[in-house]
Image: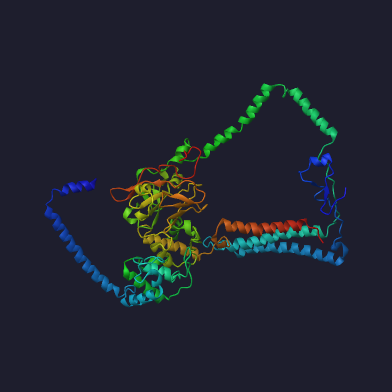
Amino acid sequence: MSVFKRKANSARRSPIAAAIVIALGLLLTGGGYAVASGAVTSANASDPYKNADNIAAGKKLFLANCASCHGQSAGGTSAAPSLIGVGAASVDFQVASGRMPGQGSGPQLPTKTPQFNEQQVLELAAYVASLAPGPAVPSEAAVLANGNAERGGELFRINCAMCHNAVGAGGALTQGKYAPALLQAEPREIYEAMITGPQNMPVFSDTNLTPTDKKDIITYLTYVQTNKSPGGYELANLGPVAEGLFAWIFLFGLIIGITVWLGAKSN
Amino acid sequence: MSENSKGLVPSSGDAEEYAYSSGAGLIVSDAIADPGIEPHRVRMTDKSVKHEKAAARQVTALFVISILGSIFAIFAYFFWPLDAENLDTVRNNTFFLGLGLTLGLFGIGFGAVHWAKTLMPDAEVSEERHQTRGSDETRARAVEIIRLADSESGFSRRKLIRRSLYGALVLFPLPAIVFFRDMSNGTDSNNPIAALRHTMWKSGTRLVQDPTGSPIKASDVTVGSAFHVIPEGLQGEGIESVPHHLEEKAKAAVLLVRLDPKDIHSEKEASWGYDGIVAYSKICTHVGCPVALYEQHTHHLLCPCHQSTFDITNDCKVVFGPATRPLPQLKIDVDAEGYLVALGDFEEPVGPSFWERKAK
């Protein structure tokens, strides 16, 4: 309703007023942008992901290792998606975990020994990030596990546990896809997965899970990773199925063995 | 009667044999022969003093293991104490305490059984089982008693009494079925059907995030993201004032995703959503598990319990699994401040079927 009211009011203003407002607005934003972009350029020198040398080196690596599937200009082909706008975080996640470059097609790309070292991953990420803006690699401070583990656990159970299991042991999806186990995942990897939504994982942008929420989730997962299960052996955290299997095969077997022994005649 | 090697005899045509025949030409004379009583075997412990002494040592050893186990359990209690500050101490405490107690009890049990089996007298006693069928006199007497009871009570003669008794017996269990209604714990326990049919969503109810309770701006929902949503008022302070708030939350849970509008194959779905943002009930129509395994690229929603799979681009129709109905969609729009709001309750009941639910 308020929208209509404002429109009705505007009819009383002089038509020149609108032009003046627009001109003023353009001047201010343009000037502001010039100042801001100057600041950004000066900051670029220290940011390795904006470093021109890294971007140039990354482009070479990209053309040699990635372009056959993702295209010469990273625009994607029928074999692989476009990388325009996926951001440095996506490259860092996929390449540092060894998922990329992929070897052969399948329902889902598995992790393997990374093909590139840390510097090469950085260069590739810098190149892809230079193509279009996208999620950046999180800072060291953003992925520190010093949040609230209890709150993180609640957020994890609501947003993540349905696929990744309540303690991050992973789980199956449809047609051979799976949510990987997070028992070995590093904080940076977890953060990047949330902001980029790799493969079939939904994106959890900062408007969905705020940086504080993400920090809490990382704190929870770090807690789970580093704390021994006090109750005993976890049986891969697979829950009642693994426990039932153990009970039926080993404990039931023991009971049968004892029963046979009780009924057998002594030699 | 000559038996062949398989224990089968050709049918002799005897009427009694035919009575039990399965129709085959050959009749199994006796599938498993009675092996009789096994000949008594003298134990080694009865034959040699050496073995007897060894068995005695074994029994003693088992009892000693029990003694050591019990002492170890006492020791373990003090050596691996529980520390309230350190949950990890539970693991060693229960493991070693349990190990000691297990050895203590198993040692006694195994020792006693081993003692009885090897050293106590092994005289074998067999008792004959009496015939299942009673003697002719007993049977005749039983029939006589029943006849007498029938004639004295007039059970056969008094038709009206007998039939009214039948009626009473048939009706007696019926109240138990009615009691099932009380198992419903909905908002209105006098009307469980209404509780199944309606959720907390009303026209104008804001969609908020679970568990933070923050309302959601349409512009904040990016393509490919998934939000776990509850109706406003079910979080934080004041939740206790909502009657049956846990049930309400369980019914009203919603998954909110944003699709590229050109991926949506259903006009109804697009018009019930807002610019590609669609909201679906998270409660599986099979047996009510939370369906929230959203695959961003295949647009499949998977139920973790029985693998029912729903296509979120096409009215959440079932593409795989035991569910038979699509997930109900929540009509949404944005309010004046740009926050997502519901346009009313779900048009059909969420979750699994119930008797009073009309088939669609």
Quadrant of the image for the N terminus of chain A? top left
Where in the figure is residue B300, as x and y percent of width and height?
A: 44, 55
Where in the figure is residue A12, as x and y percent of width and height?
A: 13, 48
The residue closer to the viewer here, A170 or B3, is B3
Q: Place residue A28 in its image quadrant.
A: bottom left
Can residue B187 be seen here? The reply is no
The residue closer to the viewer here, B185 or A29, is A29
Where in the figure is residue A186, as x and y percent of width and height?
A: 45, 68
Q: Place residue B82 in its image quadrant.
A: bottom right
Where in the figure is residue A187, as x and y percent of width and height?
A: 43, 66
At 64% from the left and 60% from the top, the residue drawn is B98
Quadrant of the image for the C terminus of chain A? bottom right
Question: According to the image, what is the colour scheme of the structure?
Answer: rainbow
Asked whether, in this view, residue B216 is left or right of residue B196, the answer is left
Q: Place residue B130 in its image quadrant.
A: top right
At 73% from the left and 23% from the top, the residue drawn is B153
Q: Is residue A162 depicted above or below A141 in this figure?
A: above
Asked whether, in this view, residue A168 is left or right of residue B135, the answer is left
Asked whether, in this view, residue A172 is left or right of residue B159, the answer is left
The residue closer to the viewer here, B171 or B119, is B171
Say how many tags the image has.
Answer: 0
Q: Is residue A85 depicted above or below B215 in this figure?
A: below
Asked whether, in this view, residue B99 is left or right of residue A94, the answer is right
Can residue B191 be seen here? The reply is yes
Q: Is residue A123 depicted above or below A17 in this figure?
A: below
